[in-house]
Image (spheres, rainbow, N blue to C red):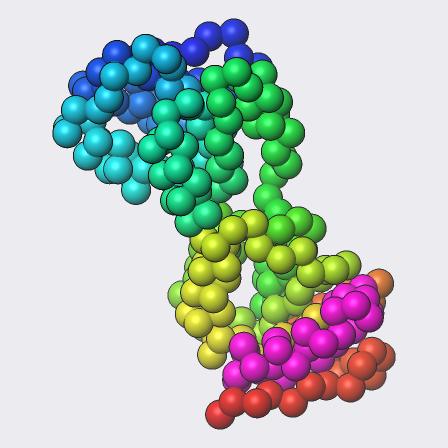
Amino acid sequence: MLERLQDLPAGIDGVKAVGRVSKEDYERVFDPLVEGARREGRRIRLLYQVGPEFEGFTPGAAWEDAKLGLASLRLFDGLAVVADVGWIRESTRLIGFLMPCPVRVFGNGQLAEAVEWLRSLPEGPAVSHRLLPERGVLVVEVRQALRAQDFDALAATADNWIDAHGDLQGIVIHARAFPGWENLAGLIRHVRFVRDHQRRVRRAALASDSRLADLAPRLAEHFAQAEVRRFGYDALDAAIAWAGGADVKAGEPAVQPTGG
């Protein structure tokens, strides 16, 4: 069966598997948890403990587990799996890198560490963005390792504008340093976002310090139809003005597009 864990810090949901877990257990415990998060507009940080009393999953439970994951992964900010069962630990590590949220495995003697890890996950998005409608410019602020859900949100904003107004006049990427991707899912979503939008952006600006100077030519390769220019990190206003169509002289010379 599945039972909800009590006395966890605010913002953390916990479930414990004991005995034999059935499809009905998932429907009774997980469905209300996920639907409640959707209704309240909140993210889920889940602690999933497989206790020493665990005996296994019924075939229906295994399918329900997979179905639930596919339907609700984008709601998760983090998943801590607490288990001593070897195949559960190894399978979690195997699929964890593909998940759109951080996943970590702990032993049953590390329950407190699992809770603390979930509490320590960063609040809010690693990538924030804002659309400037008067310019038709999307400004992207990069602060932490890139996550899949951040690109989902970015794509939704860009697509809504494109559907209503046509191509984006410009996109500005503002980053002190490139933080990389949180996991493979983040990289895949990044590639997908570029693939789906590369021909719908007229100008792309990189507002960053000199450590990211070598990314400007790569940006030109990604946004094949766009004119690309690099600006200093503190020249964000100039980058936005140029991306919006202004003839800005400050900053680095434009990088010419490489595609046709």
Residue 66 coordinates in the image, percent (x, y): 26, 37
* Residue 81 seen anywhere in this rendered image of the structure: yes
Number of marks in the rendered image: 0
For the residue pair 161 and 176, the one nearer the viewer reads as 176
In this picture, is 232 found above or below 91? below
Residue range (magenta): 207-233
22 vs 7, left or right, is left
Quadrant of the drawing holding the N terminus: top left
In this picture, is 11 found above or below 220? above
Q: Residue at x 72, y 76 (%)?
A: 214
28 vs 79, left or right, is left
**Does the stretch in magenta take in 91?**
no
Residue 161 coordinates in the image, percent (x, y): 48, 63
Residue 42 coordinates in the image, percent (x, y): 48, 30
Residue 192, by quadrant, is bottom left
Q: Looking at this rendering, what residue extends furthest in the front direction? A: 86
Residue 22, by quadrant, is top left
Q: Residue at x 52, y 83 (%)?
A: 224
**Does the stretch in magenta take in 224?**
yes
Residue 166 coordinates in the image, percent (x, y): 45, 73
Residue 39, by quadrant, is top left
Q: Residue at x 26, y 12 (%)?
A: 19
* Residue 28 seen anywhere in this rendered image of the structure: no
In this picture, is 16 found above or below 148? above
For the residue pair 125 and 56, the one nearer the viewer reads as 56
For the residue pair 166 and 212, the one nearer the viewer reads as 212
Q: Residue at x 65, y 89 (%)?
A: 256
